[in-house]
Amino acid sequence: MAFGALLRRFRIDAGLSQAALAEAAGVSPSAIGAYEQGVHASPHRETIRLIAEALHLDPAGRLELEQAGRRPPKSSRPPGARDRSLGNLPQERSSFVGRSDEIRDIARLTGQHRLVTIVGPGGVGKTRLAQRVAAGEAAKWVDGSWFFDFAAIEQAEFVLSTIASVLGVQAQSAEGLASSLRSKRMLLIFDNCEHLIERISEIVAAFLRRCPDVTIVATSRAPLRMAGETVVRLSPLPVPIAGASTDAIMAAEAIALFVERARAADSNFHPTADDAPTIGDICRNLDGLPLAIEIASMRVPLIGLRALRDQIASVMSSKLPIRDLPARQQTLERTLDWSLALLDQTSQVIFYLLSVFVGGCTIEAAQFVCNRSSIGSSETIDGILQLSETSLINVDLHATSFRYTMHATTYALARRRLEQSERFNNVVRAHGDWLAFEAERYGRHVGERITRKRWHERFDPEIDNVRAALQNGIQGKLSARTVSTILCEFSPIWEDSALLIEYRKWISDAAPVICADIDPETLASFDFAKAIAALPQEELSSYGRAIESSRAAGGKNRRLTSLSGLFARAYSQTEAP
Protein backbone atom coordinates (compact mmCIF):
# COMPACT_ATOMS: atom_id res chain seq x y z
CA MET A 1 0.00 0.00 0.00
CA ALA A 2 1.26 3.48 -0.87
CA PHE A 3 2.34 5.74 1.99
CA GLY A 4 -0.52 8.20 1.48
CA ALA A 5 -3.24 5.55 1.47
CA LEU A 6 -1.74 3.85 4.51
CA LEU A 7 -1.45 7.15 6.39
CA ARG A 8 -5.08 7.99 5.64
CA ARG A 9 -6.20 4.57 6.89
CA PHE A 10 -4.26 4.94 10.13
CA ARG A 11 -5.56 8.51 10.63
CA ILE A 12 -9.19 7.51 10.15
CA ASP A 13 -8.76 4.49 12.44
CA ALA A 14 -7.41 6.88 15.09
CA GLY A 15 -10.43 9.16 14.66
CA LEU A 16 -8.32 12.20 13.76
CA SER A 17 -8.84 14.93 11.19
CA GLN A 18 -5.90 16.03 9.06
CA ALA A 19 -5.65 19.19 11.16
CA ALA A 20 -5.70 17.26 14.45
CA LEU A 21 -3.01 14.86 13.26
CA ALA A 22 -0.88 17.74 11.96
CA GLU A 23 -1.10 19.52 15.31
CA ALA A 24 -0.21 16.38 17.28
CA ALA A 25 2.74 15.59 15.00
CA GLY A 26 4.00 19.16 14.77
CA VAL A 27 3.64 19.42 10.99
CA SER A 28 1.41 21.55 8.79
CA PRO A 29 -2.10 20.37 7.79
CA SER A 30 -1.16 20.95 4.15
CA ALA A 31 1.72 18.47 4.56
CA ILE A 32 -0.64 15.76 5.83
CA GLY A 33 -2.95 16.45 2.90
CA ALA A 34 -0.05 16.29 0.43
CA TYR A 35 1.11 12.97 1.84
CA GLU A 36 -2.36 11.43 1.65
CA GLN A 37 -2.85 12.66 -1.92
CA GLY A 38 0.49 11.23 -2.99
CA VAL A 39 1.99 14.63 -3.84
CA HIS A 40 4.87 13.84 -1.49
CA ALA A 41 5.34 10.07 -1.50
CA SER A 42 8.59 9.75 0.48
CA PRO A 43 8.68 11.94 3.61
CA HIS A 44 11.75 12.27 5.81
CA ARG A 45 12.28 9.50 8.36
CA GLU A 46 11.93 11.97 11.27
CA THR A 47 8.56 13.13 9.92
CA ILE A 48 7.35 9.55 9.74
CA ARG A 49 8.46 9.00 13.33
CA LEU A 50 6.54 12.07 14.53
CA ILE A 51 3.40 11.01 12.66
CA ALA A 52 3.64 7.43 14.00
CA GLU A 53 3.93 8.75 17.55
CA ALA A 54 0.98 11.09 17.06
CA LEU A 55 -1.09 8.14 15.80
CA HIS A 56 0.04 5.98 18.75
CA LEU A 57 0.90 3.15 16.35
CA ASP A 58 2.07 -0.18 17.71
CA PRO A 59 5.49 -1.49 16.54
CA ALA A 60 3.96 -3.38 13.60
CA GLY A 61 2.07 -0.31 12.40
CA ARG A 62 5.13 1.88 12.86
CA LEU A 63 7.23 -0.51 10.77
CA GLU A 64 4.57 -0.70 8.05
CA LEU A 65 4.33 3.09 7.83
CA GLU A 66 8.10 3.55 7.73
CA GLN A 67 8.60 0.93 5.01
CA ALA A 68 5.79 2.43 2.91
CA GLY A 69 7.50 5.81 3.21
CA ARG A 70 10.72 4.32 1.88
CA ARG A 71 9.09 2.75 -1.17
CA PRO A 72 10.10 4.67 -4.30
CA PRO A 73 7.13 6.20 -6.15
CA LYS A 74 6.38 4.87 -9.60
CA SER A 75 7.80 7.97 -11.26
CA SER A 76 11.20 7.39 -9.63
CA ARG A 77 11.97 4.05 -11.20
CA PRO A 78 15.60 3.86 -12.25
CA PRO A 79 16.26 4.78 -15.89
CA GLY A 80 15.53 1.87 -18.17
CA ALA A 81 13.73 -0.27 -15.59
CA ARG A 82 11.08 -2.28 -17.43
CA ASP A 83 8.27 -4.64 -16.62
CA ARG A 84 9.12 -8.31 -16.25
CA SER A 85 8.54 -9.05 -19.94
CA LEU A 86 11.61 -6.93 -20.73
CA GLY A 87 13.81 -7.72 -17.76
CA ASN A 88 13.90 -7.90 -14.01
CA LEU A 89 16.35 -5.23 -12.87
CA PRO A 90 15.81 -4.48 -9.17
CA GLN A 91 14.67 -1.02 -8.23
CA GLU A 92 17.38 1.02 -6.55
CA ARG A 93 16.99 1.26 -2.77
CA SER A 94 18.86 4.55 -2.52
CA SER A 95 20.54 7.19 -4.66
CA PHE A 96 23.66 6.23 -6.60
CA VAL A 97 26.70 8.35 -5.74
CA GLY A 98 29.84 8.75 -7.87
CA ARG A 99 31.45 6.21 -10.24
CA SER A 100 30.60 8.27 -13.34
CA ASP A 101 33.87 7.29 -15.04
CA GLU A 102 33.36 3.61 -14.28
CA ILE A 103 29.76 3.70 -15.52
CA ARG A 104 30.87 5.27 -18.80
CA ASP A 105 33.78 2.86 -19.26
CA ILE A 106 31.78 -0.30 -18.53
CA ALA A 107 28.92 0.84 -20.77
CA ARG A 108 31.46 1.33 -23.56
CA LEU A 109 32.99 -2.10 -22.93
CA THR A 110 29.61 -3.85 -23.14
CA GLY A 111 29.30 -2.45 -26.64
CA GLN A 112 32.69 -3.89 -27.61
CA HIS A 113 32.95 -7.14 -25.64
CA ARG A 114 30.40 -9.82 -24.81
CA LEU A 115 31.78 -10.74 -21.39
CA VAL A 116 32.76 -8.02 -18.92
CA THR A 117 33.64 -9.05 -15.36
CA ILE A 118 33.69 -6.47 -12.57
CA VAL A 119 36.19 -7.68 -9.98
CA GLY A 120 36.75 -6.29 -6.49
CA PRO A 121 36.51 -7.01 -2.76
CA GLY A 122 33.22 -7.45 -0.95
CA GLY A 123 31.46 -4.18 -0.16
CA VAL A 124 33.22 -2.21 -2.90
CA GLY A 125 30.00 -1.65 -4.88
CA LYS A 126 30.19 -4.18 -7.73
CA THR A 127 26.49 -5.05 -7.68
CA ARG A 128 25.17 -1.49 -7.62
CA LEU A 129 27.57 -0.49 -10.40
CA ALA A 130 26.48 -3.37 -12.64
CA GLN A 131 22.82 -2.56 -12.04
CA ARG A 132 23.36 1.13 -12.77
CA VAL A 133 25.15 0.34 -16.05
CA ALA A 134 22.35 -2.04 -17.06
CA ALA A 135 19.65 0.51 -16.24
CA GLY A 136 21.37 3.21 -18.25
CA GLU A 137 21.83 0.95 -21.27
CA ALA A 138 18.41 -0.77 -21.12
CA ALA A 139 17.20 0.69 -24.41
CA LYS A 140 19.93 -1.22 -26.28
CA TRP A 141 18.58 -4.63 -25.27
CA VAL A 142 15.27 -5.30 -27.02
CA ASP A 143 14.80 -8.58 -25.13
CA GLY A 144 15.60 -7.07 -21.77
CA SER A 145 18.25 -6.71 -19.11
CA TRP A 146 18.17 -9.63 -16.66
CA PHE A 147 19.68 -9.79 -13.19
CA PHE A 148 20.74 -13.03 -11.48
CA ASP A 149 22.06 -12.97 -7.91
CA PHE A 150 23.96 -16.17 -7.20
CA ALA A 151 24.94 -15.29 -3.63
CA ALA A 152 22.21 -17.50 -2.18
CA ILE A 153 22.99 -20.50 -4.40
CA GLU A 154 25.36 -22.86 -2.63
CA GLN A 155 25.25 -25.78 -5.08
CA ALA A 156 26.56 -25.36 -8.61
CA GLU A 157 23.95 -27.72 -10.03
CA PHE A 158 21.21 -25.11 -9.44
CA VAL A 159 22.80 -22.34 -11.51
CA LEU A 160 21.43 -23.60 -14.83
CA SER A 161 17.89 -24.17 -13.57
CA THR A 162 17.85 -20.76 -11.89
CA ILE A 163 18.77 -18.97 -15.13
CA ALA A 164 16.33 -21.05 -17.18
CA SER A 165 13.48 -20.46 -14.74
CA VAL A 166 13.93 -16.67 -14.67
CA LEU A 167 14.10 -16.52 -18.47
CA GLY A 168 11.12 -18.86 -18.82
CA VAL A 169 12.79 -21.59 -20.88
CA GLN A 170 13.28 -25.33 -20.48
CA ALA A 171 16.87 -26.53 -20.55
CA GLN A 172 18.81 -29.55 -19.32
CA SER A 173 22.26 -28.33 -20.35
CA ALA A 174 24.23 -25.15 -20.88
CA GLU A 175 24.18 -25.74 -24.63
CA GLY A 176 20.43 -26.25 -24.59
CA LEU A 177 19.91 -23.06 -22.62
CA ALA A 178 22.09 -21.06 -24.99
CA SER A 179 20.39 -22.54 -28.05
CA SER A 180 16.97 -21.46 -26.79
CA LEU A 181 18.22 -17.86 -26.57
CA ARG A 182 20.34 -17.71 -29.72
CA SER A 183 18.06 -15.18 -31.46
CA LYS A 184 17.72 -12.90 -28.42
CA ARG A 185 19.35 -9.52 -27.89
CA MET A 186 19.72 -9.19 -24.14
CA LEU A 187 22.02 -8.24 -21.30
CA LEU A 188 22.57 -10.75 -18.48
CA ILE A 189 24.03 -9.66 -15.14
CA PHE A 190 25.56 -12.57 -13.21
CA ASP A 191 26.11 -11.25 -9.68
CA ASN A 192 28.27 -12.80 -6.92
CA CYS A 193 29.94 -15.47 -9.04
CA GLU A 194 33.07 -16.15 -6.97
CA HIS A 195 31.92 -19.40 -5.31
CA LEU A 196 30.46 -20.86 -8.52
CA ILE A 197 33.07 -19.83 -11.06
CA GLU A 198 33.54 -23.23 -12.73
CA ARG A 199 29.84 -23.83 -13.42
CA ILE A 200 29.10 -20.24 -14.40
CA SER A 201 32.06 -20.26 -16.79
CA GLU A 202 30.63 -23.32 -18.56
CA ILE A 203 27.29 -21.58 -19.05
CA VAL A 204 28.90 -18.31 -20.14
CA ALA A 205 31.04 -20.19 -22.67
CA ALA A 206 27.90 -21.70 -24.20
CA PHE A 207 26.32 -18.24 -24.49
CA LEU A 208 29.44 -16.85 -26.15
CA ARG A 209 29.42 -19.70 -28.69
CA ARG A 210 25.73 -19.71 -29.56
CA CYS A 211 24.26 -16.28 -28.76
CA PRO A 212 25.88 -13.52 -30.82
CA ASP A 213 23.63 -10.79 -29.38
CA VAL A 214 23.77 -11.74 -25.70
CA THR A 215 26.20 -9.77 -23.53
CA ILE A 216 27.11 -10.77 -19.98
CA VAL A 217 28.29 -8.56 -17.14
CA ALA A 218 29.57 -10.65 -14.23
CA THR A 219 30.55 -9.50 -10.75
CA SER A 220 33.00 -11.52 -8.70
CA ARG A 221 35.85 -11.26 -6.26
CA ALA A 222 37.98 -13.07 -8.85
CA PRO A 223 37.94 -13.17 -12.68
CA LEU A 224 36.22 -16.05 -14.47
CA ARG A 225 39.51 -16.57 -16.34
CA MET A 226 38.07 -17.61 -19.68
CA ALA A 227 38.58 -16.68 -23.30
CA GLY A 228 36.82 -13.50 -24.34
CA GLU A 229 36.65 -12.05 -20.83
CA THR A 230 37.37 -8.35 -20.24
CA VAL A 231 38.13 -7.63 -16.58
CA VAL A 232 37.35 -4.32 -14.86
CA ARG A 233 39.01 -4.09 -11.44
CA LEU A 234 36.90 -1.92 -9.17
CA SER A 235 38.71 -0.02 -6.44
CA PRO A 236 37.19 1.60 -3.35
CA LEU A 237 35.98 5.17 -3.68
CA PRO A 238 38.72 7.82 -3.74
CA VAL A 239 39.42 9.41 -0.36
CA PRO A 240 41.23 12.72 0.29
CA ILE A 241 44.76 12.71 1.66
CA ALA A 242 45.33 13.90 5.22
CA GLY A 243 45.64 17.67 5.35
CA ALA A 244 43.77 18.25 2.08
CA SER A 245 41.83 21.47 1.61
CA THR A 246 38.14 21.64 2.44
CA ASP A 247 37.25 21.83 -1.26
CA ALA A 248 39.38 18.77 -2.06
CA ILE A 249 37.85 16.81 0.81
CA MET A 250 34.24 17.61 -0.10
CA ALA A 251 34.89 16.83 -3.78
CA ALA A 252 35.97 13.24 -3.03
CA GLU A 253 33.41 10.56 -3.92
CA ALA A 254 33.79 8.73 -0.59
CA ILE A 255 32.91 11.93 1.26
CA ALA A 256 29.96 12.59 -1.06
CA LEU A 257 28.59 9.12 -0.27
CA PHE A 258 29.06 9.61 3.47
CA VAL A 259 27.27 12.96 3.44
CA GLU A 260 24.41 11.64 1.29
CA ARG A 261 23.76 8.65 3.54
CA ALA A 262 24.19 10.60 6.78
CA ARG A 263 21.66 13.13 5.50
CA ALA A 264 19.26 10.29 4.70
CA ALA A 265 19.56 9.22 8.33
CA ASP A 266 19.15 12.79 9.61
CA SER A 267 17.71 15.45 7.30
CA ASN A 268 19.23 18.14 9.53
CA PHE A 269 22.78 16.97 8.84
CA HIS A 270 24.58 19.81 7.03
CA PRO A 271 28.35 19.51 7.49
CA THR A 272 30.38 22.70 7.73
CA ALA A 273 33.91 23.41 6.54
CA ASP A 274 35.12 22.57 10.04
CA ASP A 275 33.53 19.10 9.73
CA ALA A 276 35.32 18.25 6.47
CA PRO A 277 38.59 16.96 8.02
CA THR A 278 36.62 14.77 10.44
CA ILE A 279 34.62 13.19 7.61
CA GLY A 280 37.84 12.73 5.65
CA ASP A 281 39.41 10.87 8.59
CA ILE A 282 36.38 8.58 8.87
CA CYS A 283 36.36 7.67 5.17
CA ARG A 284 40.14 7.11 5.12
CA ASN A 285 39.92 4.77 8.10
CA LEU A 286 37.19 2.87 6.24
CA ASP A 287 39.46 2.51 3.17
CA GLY A 288 36.83 4.15 0.96
CA LEU A 289 34.69 0.99 0.99
CA PRO A 290 31.13 2.03 0.11
CA LEU A 291 29.39 -0.55 2.31
CA ALA A 292 31.53 0.34 5.33
CA ILE A 293 30.89 4.05 4.72
CA GLU A 294 27.13 3.50 4.48
CA ILE A 295 27.05 1.53 7.73
CA ALA A 296 29.15 4.11 9.59
CA SER A 297 27.20 7.11 8.28
CA MET A 298 23.97 5.74 9.74
CA ARG A 299 25.44 6.36 13.21
CA VAL A 300 25.87 10.12 12.81
CA PRO A 301 22.48 10.97 14.38
CA LEU A 302 23.26 8.71 17.33
CA ILE A 303 26.80 9.70 18.34
CA GLY A 304 27.84 12.68 16.20
CA LEU A 305 30.75 13.12 13.80
CA ARG A 306 33.66 13.43 16.21
CA ALA A 307 32.68 10.51 18.41
CA LEU A 308 32.13 8.50 15.23
CA ARG A 309 35.63 9.38 14.00
CA ASP A 310 37.20 8.41 17.33
CA GLN A 311 35.34 5.11 17.57
CA ILE A 312 36.16 4.13 13.97
CA ALA A 313 39.82 5.02 14.51
CA SER A 314 39.94 2.92 17.68
CA VAL A 315 38.32 -0.07 16.00
CA MET A 316 40.59 0.09 12.94
CA SER A 317 43.78 0.53 14.97
CA SER A 318 43.42 -2.98 16.35
CA LYS A 319 46.44 -5.02 15.27
CA LEU A 320 44.76 -8.37 15.84
CA PRO A 321 44.20 -10.00 12.43
CA ILE A 322 40.79 -11.40 11.54
CA ARG A 323 41.59 -14.91 10.29
CA ASP A 324 43.35 -14.66 6.93
CA LEU A 325 41.17 -11.95 5.37
CA PRO A 326 42.67 -9.32 3.06
CA ALA A 327 43.11 -5.92 4.69
CA ARG A 328 40.02 -4.34 3.11
CA GLN A 329 37.80 -7.25 4.14
CA GLN A 330 39.11 -6.88 7.68
CA THR A 331 38.10 -3.22 7.55
CA LEU A 332 34.58 -4.19 6.54
CA GLU A 333 34.24 -6.91 9.19
CA ARG A 334 35.50 -4.59 11.91
CA THR A 335 32.97 -1.98 10.80
CA LEU A 336 30.18 -4.53 10.96
CA ASP A 337 31.25 -5.73 14.40
CA TRP A 338 31.48 -2.15 15.67
CA SER A 339 28.04 -1.24 14.34
CA LEU A 340 26.50 -4.37 15.84
CA ALA A 341 28.05 -3.63 19.22
CA LEU A 342 26.08 -0.37 19.34
CA LEU A 343 22.80 -2.30 19.18
CA ASP A 344 21.03 -3.87 22.14
CA GLN A 345 21.64 -7.58 22.73
CA THR A 346 18.28 -8.67 21.33
CA SER A 347 18.84 -6.86 18.03
CA GLN A 348 22.27 -8.47 17.71
CA VAL A 349 20.73 -11.91 18.18
CA ILE A 350 18.03 -11.13 15.61
CA PHE A 351 20.75 -10.14 13.12
CA TYR A 352 22.39 -13.55 13.46
CA LEU A 353 19.06 -15.41 13.41
CA LEU A 354 18.08 -13.77 10.11
CA SER A 355 21.06 -15.41 8.43
CA VAL A 356 19.25 -18.77 8.58
CA PHE A 357 17.17 -17.43 5.70
CA VAL A 358 18.70 -17.77 2.25
CA GLY A 359 17.64 -15.03 -0.13
CA GLY A 360 15.77 -13.03 2.49
CA CYS A 361 12.53 -13.36 4.44
CA THR A 362 9.23 -11.68 5.29
CA ILE A 363 8.48 -10.12 8.67
CA GLU A 364 6.22 -13.10 9.51
CA ALA A 365 9.03 -15.55 8.81
CA ALA A 366 11.43 -13.57 10.97
CA GLN A 367 8.90 -13.52 13.81
CA PHE A 368 8.35 -17.29 13.55
CA VAL A 369 12.05 -18.09 13.82
CA CYS A 370 12.74 -15.47 16.49
CA ASN A 371 9.78 -16.69 18.56
CA ARG A 372 11.47 -20.11 18.69
CA SER A 373 14.46 -18.35 20.28
CA SER A 374 12.22 -16.69 22.90
CA ILE A 375 12.15 -13.30 21.16
CA GLY A 376 8.65 -11.83 20.99
CA SER A 377 6.98 -10.56 17.84
CA SER A 378 7.15 -6.91 18.93
CA GLU A 379 10.81 -7.29 19.89
CA THR A 380 11.48 -8.79 16.47
CA ILE A 381 9.87 -5.83 14.72
CA ASP A 382 11.84 -3.37 16.84
CA GLY A 383 15.07 -5.24 16.12
CA ILE A 384 14.44 -5.33 12.38
CA LEU A 385 13.72 -1.61 12.44
CA GLN A 386 17.08 -0.98 14.13
CA LEU A 387 18.91 -3.24 11.69
CA SER A 388 17.33 -1.60 8.63
CA GLU A 389 17.94 1.92 9.94
CA THR A 390 21.64 1.12 10.34
CA SER A 391 21.99 -0.54 6.89
CA LEU A 392 22.80 -3.94 8.41
CA ILE A 393 19.85 -5.39 6.53
CA ASN A 394 18.13 -4.21 3.36
CA VAL A 395 14.41 -3.72 2.77
CA ASP A 396 13.09 -4.76 -0.64
CA LEU A 397 9.56 -4.59 -1.99
CA HIS A 398 8.51 -7.78 -3.78
CA ALA A 399 5.00 -7.89 -5.23
CA THR A 400 2.86 -6.79 -2.27
CA SER A 401 5.18 -7.59 0.65
CA PHE A 402 8.48 -6.41 2.08
CA ARG A 403 11.47 -8.74 2.23
CA TYR A 404 14.50 -8.34 4.43
CA THR A 405 17.84 -9.26 2.90
CA MET A 406 21.53 -8.81 3.62
CA HIS A 407 24.50 -7.77 1.52
CA ALA A 408 26.53 -10.88 0.66
CA THR A 409 29.43 -9.82 2.91
CA THR A 410 27.14 -8.98 5.81
CA TYR A 411 25.31 -12.28 5.38
CA ALA A 412 28.58 -14.24 5.43
CA LEU A 413 29.54 -12.69 8.78
CA ALA A 414 26.11 -13.27 10.34
CA ARG A 415 25.91 -16.83 9.05
CA ARG A 416 29.36 -17.72 10.34
CA ARG A 417 28.47 -16.44 13.81
CA LEU A 418 25.16 -18.31 13.79
CA GLU A 419 26.81 -21.59 12.80
CA GLN A 420 29.28 -21.17 15.67
CA SER A 421 26.49 -20.69 18.22
CA GLU A 422 24.78 -23.35 20.31
CA ARG A 423 21.38 -22.36 18.94
CA PHE A 424 22.22 -23.18 15.28
CA ASN A 425 20.49 -26.59 15.04
CA ASN A 426 17.34 -25.29 16.72
CA VAL A 427 17.24 -22.31 14.36
CA VAL A 428 17.62 -24.59 11.34
CA ARG A 429 14.68 -26.68 12.56
CA ALA A 430 12.62 -23.54 13.10
CA HIS A 431 13.42 -22.44 9.53
CA GLY A 432 12.17 -25.75 8.12
CA ASP A 433 9.09 -25.76 10.35
CA TRP A 434 8.21 -22.25 9.19
CA LEU A 435 8.31 -23.27 5.52
CA ALA A 436 6.18 -26.35 6.17
CA PHE A 437 3.66 -24.42 8.28
CA GLU A 438 3.32 -21.53 5.86
CA ALA A 439 3.02 -23.71 2.76
CA GLU A 440 0.38 -25.93 4.38
CA ARG A 441 -1.57 -22.88 5.54
CA TYR A 442 -1.68 -21.40 2.04
CA GLY A 443 -2.01 -24.74 0.28
CA ARG A 444 -5.34 -25.50 1.92
CA HIS A 445 -6.92 -22.54 0.15
CA VAL A 446 -5.34 -22.62 -3.33
CA GLY A 447 -8.17 -22.62 -5.84
CA GLU A 448 -10.60 -21.33 -3.23
CA ARG A 449 -9.63 -18.03 -1.57
CA ILE A 450 -6.10 -17.99 -3.02
CA THR A 451 -5.39 -18.05 -6.75
CA ARG A 452 -2.40 -19.84 -8.22
CA LYS A 453 -1.02 -16.43 -9.24
CA ARG A 454 -1.23 -15.13 -5.69
CA TRP A 455 0.43 -18.29 -4.41
CA HIS A 456 3.38 -17.68 -6.73
CA GLU A 457 3.61 -14.02 -5.71
CA ARG A 458 3.90 -15.18 -2.12
CA PHE A 459 6.21 -18.17 -2.48
CA ASP A 460 8.36 -17.80 -5.60
CA PRO A 461 10.80 -15.56 -3.66
CA GLU A 462 11.29 -18.43 -1.19
CA ILE A 463 12.90 -20.85 -3.63
CA ASP A 464 16.37 -20.48 -2.09
CA ASN A 465 14.89 -20.97 1.37
CA VAL A 466 13.17 -24.12 0.13
CA ARG A 467 16.42 -25.43 -1.34
CA ALA A 468 18.27 -24.72 1.91
CA ALA A 469 15.61 -26.49 3.97
CA LEU A 470 15.60 -29.54 1.70
CA GLN A 471 19.38 -29.74 1.91
CA ASN A 472 19.14 -29.55 5.70
CA GLY A 473 16.54 -32.30 5.63
CA ILE A 474 18.68 -34.58 3.49
CA GLN A 475 21.49 -34.06 6.01
CA GLY A 476 19.17 -35.22 8.80
CA LYS A 477 18.62 -31.81 10.42
CA LEU A 478 14.83 -31.84 9.82
CA SER A 479 12.17 -34.47 10.44
CA ALA A 480 11.01 -36.68 7.59
CA ARG A 481 7.53 -35.20 7.99
CA THR A 482 8.84 -31.66 7.50
CA VAL A 483 10.88 -32.60 4.43
CA SER A 484 7.94 -34.46 2.89
CA THR A 485 5.58 -31.55 3.55
CA ILE A 486 7.97 -29.04 1.97
CA LEU A 487 8.43 -31.22 -1.11
CA CYS A 488 4.69 -31.70 -1.48
CA GLU A 489 3.33 -28.25 -0.64
CA PHE A 490 5.94 -26.34 -2.64
CA SER A 491 5.34 -28.38 -5.79
CA PRO A 492 3.99 -25.35 -7.75
CA ILE A 493 7.41 -23.68 -7.51
CA TRP A 494 8.94 -26.51 -9.49
CA GLU A 495 5.91 -27.51 -11.58
CA ASP A 496 5.17 -24.03 -12.95
CA SER A 497 8.73 -22.71 -13.26
CA ALA A 498 10.51 -25.04 -15.66
CA LEU A 499 12.25 -26.73 -12.71
CA LEU A 500 10.85 -30.27 -12.82
CA ILE A 501 14.30 -31.74 -13.47
CA GLU A 502 15.60 -30.16 -10.28
CA TYR A 503 12.44 -31.26 -8.44
CA ARG A 504 13.03 -34.88 -9.41
CA LYS A 505 16.55 -34.70 -8.04
CA TRP A 506 15.35 -33.36 -4.70
CA ILE A 507 12.80 -36.17 -4.51
CA SER A 508 15.47 -38.75 -5.29
CA ASP A 509 17.89 -37.32 -2.72
CA ALA A 510 15.22 -37.09 -0.03
CA ALA A 511 13.83 -40.59 -0.57
CA PRO A 512 16.15 -42.38 1.92
CA VAL A 513 15.18 -39.95 4.70
CA ILE A 514 11.44 -39.98 4.02
CA CYS A 515 10.98 -43.66 3.20
CA ALA A 516 12.61 -44.61 6.50
CA ASP A 517 9.60 -43.01 8.21
CA ILE A 518 6.47 -45.07 8.88
CA ASP A 519 4.01 -42.19 9.30
CA PRO A 520 1.25 -42.65 6.67
CA GLU A 521 0.71 -38.90 6.16
CA THR A 522 4.44 -38.38 5.56
CA LEU A 523 4.50 -41.15 2.95
CA ALA A 524 1.29 -39.88 1.34
CA SER A 525 2.73 -36.40 0.91
CA PHE A 526 5.89 -37.85 -0.58
CA ASP A 527 3.92 -40.00 -3.04
CA PHE A 528 1.99 -36.92 -4.09
CA ALA A 529 5.25 -35.06 -4.76
CA LYS A 530 6.56 -38.01 -6.79
CA ALA A 531 3.37 -38.02 -8.86
CA ILE A 532 3.76 -34.35 -9.76
CA ALA A 533 7.39 -34.87 -10.77
CA ALA A 534 6.79 -38.12 -12.63
CA LEU A 535 7.83 -38.56 -16.24
CA PRO A 536 4.85 -38.54 -18.66
CA GLN A 537 4.84 -42.32 -19.08
CA GLU A 538 4.74 -42.79 -15.30
CA GLU A 539 2.14 -40.17 -14.36
CA LEU A 540 -0.96 -42.37 -14.22
CA SER A 541 0.63 -45.04 -12.06
CA SER A 542 2.24 -42.41 -9.83
CA TYR A 543 -1.06 -40.67 -9.17
CA GLY A 544 -2.64 -44.04 -8.49
CA ARG A 545 -0.07 -44.72 -5.77
CA ALA A 546 -0.63 -41.24 -4.34
CA ILE A 547 -4.38 -41.90 -4.11
CA GLU A 548 -3.84 -45.19 -2.28
CA SER A 549 -1.32 -43.60 0.12
CA SER A 550 -3.69 -40.73 0.81
CA ARG A 551 -6.56 -43.15 1.47
CA ALA A 552 -4.41 -45.07 3.93
CA ALA A 553 -3.50 -41.83 5.70
CA GLY A 554 -7.09 -40.62 5.77
CA GLY A 555 -6.18 -37.45 3.88
CA LYS A 556 -9.38 -36.53 2.06
CA ASN A 557 -8.14 -33.29 0.49
CA ARG A 558 -4.88 -34.78 -0.71
CA ARG A 559 -6.78 -37.73 -2.22
CA LEU A 560 -9.11 -35.38 -4.09
CA THR A 561 -6.14 -33.43 -5.43
CA SER A 562 -4.52 -36.65 -6.60
CA LEU A 563 -7.75 -37.80 -8.24
CA SER A 564 -8.09 -34.52 -10.12
CA GLY A 565 -4.55 -34.89 -11.39
CA LEU A 566 -5.18 -38.48 -12.40
CA PHE A 567 -8.36 -37.68 -14.30
CA ALA A 568 -6.82 -34.63 -15.99
CA ARG A 569 -3.96 -36.71 -17.34
CA ALA A 570 -6.17 -39.63 -18.28
CA TYR A 571 -8.47 -37.28 -20.18
CA SER A 572 -5.60 -35.58 -21.99
CA GLN A 573 -4.23 -38.97 -23.07
CA THR A 574 -7.58 -40.22 -24.37
CA GLU A 575 -8.17 -36.96 -26.25
CA ALA A 576 -4.72 -36.94 -27.84
CA PRO A 577 -4.79 -37.47 -31.63
Image (cartoon, rainbow, N blue to C red):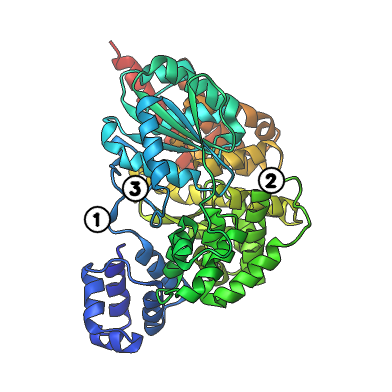
Q: Which badge, 2 or 1, is on the more N-terminal residue?
A: 1
Picture residue at 58% right of the left edge, 46% below the top = 122
**Amino acid of disc 1:** Ser
Q: For the residues carrying marks 3 and 1, which lies nearer the camera in this image?
A: 1
Tag of residue 326: 2
Which residue occupies the foreground of this view, 447 or 431?
431
Mark 3 Cα shell of 10 Å, populated few (<14), some (14-19), many (≥20): few
Displayed quadrant of residue 89: top left
Residue 268 appears in the rendering: yes
Up/down of 228 relative to 195, above or below: above
Mark 3 falls on what kind of element?
loop
Note whether 380 is above or below 135 in the view shown: below
Amino acid type at circle 2 is: Pro
Between 451 and 551, the one lying in front of the other is: 451
Q: Which residue is mark 1?
A: 75
The structure residue drawn at horizontal position 58% and vertical position 38%, both measured from the top left corner, is: 221
- Report whether 484 appears left or right of 52: right
Q: Position of residue 215 (x, y in %)?
A: 39, 27
Residue 522 coordinates in the image, percent (x, y): 61, 39
First along the sequence among labels 2 and 3: 2
Q: Which residue is found at the position 21% from the left and 68% from the top?
A: 39
Q: SS for tag 1?
A: helix
Residue under pointer 3: 448
Looking at the image, residue 69 sits to the left or right of residue 420; the answer is left
Label 3 to label 1: alpha-carbon separation: 36 Å
In the orientation shown, which residue stands out farthest toward the right?
A: 320
Q: Earlier in the sequence, mark 3 or mark 1?
A: 1
Q: CA distance from mark 2 to mark 3?
A: 55 Å
Q: Are marks 2 and 1 in contact (CB under 8 Å)?
A: no
